[in-house]
Image (cartoon, rainbow, N blue to C red):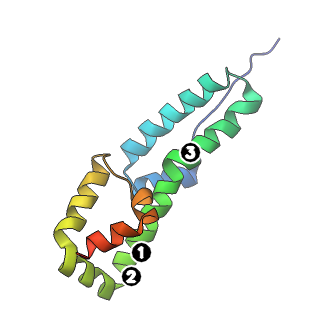
């Protein structure tokens, strides 16, 4: 009886997003943890693991990378908005990005809350 080989990993698209978004090391480490969780939760059932892994990727990594990409485009491609944001709430913006990098906050959660925008602009 031939052995079943189960391969789980992220696609080239996900790897590129991880490098551009939150840093390759964080993306790869978290991706590996999610793969292990999917394997464990599905009790190595090959037919279920891939689907669960994709769900976990969406929930934990891809949503955050999309939010980061949106905010990066906003700041890099719209200098008027960027200048206003840094002029009115530069310190808070820098602290927010630091919190995201430290894992204490997330881009996607902040984007869901209108109060985040008001705080940024000192309102």
Which residue occupies 21% across, 64% down? 94
Question: Badges 2 and 1: C-beta atoms under 8 Å apart?
Answer: yes
Q: CA distance from mark 3 to mark 2?
A: 28 Å
Could you say whether the residue bearing mark 1 is in a helix, strand or loop?
A: helix
Quick check: 31 above or below 38? Answer: below
Which residue occupies 41% across, 74% down? 73
The crowding category of the residue bearing disc 3, from other C-alpha atoms within 10 Å (few below 14, some 14 to 19, many at least 20), is many
Residue 55 picture quarter = top right
3 or 2: tag closer to the N-terminus: 3
Quick check: 4 above or below 119? Answer: above
- Marker disc for residue 77: 2
Residue labelled with disc 3? 57
Which residue occupies 31% across, 73% down? 118
- Horizontal relation, residue 118 to residue 8: left or right: left
Residue labelled with disc 1? 73
Image quarter of the N terminus: top right
Residue 52 picture quarter = top right
Which residue occupies 25% across, 84% down? 84
Q: CA distance from mark 2 to mark 1?
A: 5 Å
């Amino acid at each position: 009886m031939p052995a079943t080989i189960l391969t789980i990993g992220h696609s080239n698209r996900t790897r590129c997003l991880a490098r551009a978004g939150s840093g390759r090391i964080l993306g790869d480490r978290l991706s590996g943890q999610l793969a292990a969780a999917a394997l464990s939760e599905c009790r190595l059932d090959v037919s279920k693991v891939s689907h669960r892994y994709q769900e976990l990727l969406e929930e934990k990594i891809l949503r955050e990378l999309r939010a980061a990409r949106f905010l990066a485009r906003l700041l890099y491609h719209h200098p008027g908005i960027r200048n206003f944001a840094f002029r009115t709430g530069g310190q808070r913006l820098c602290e927010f990005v630091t919190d995201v990098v430290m894992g204490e906050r997330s881009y996607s959660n902040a984007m869901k809350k209108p109060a985040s925008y008001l705080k940024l602009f000192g309102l």
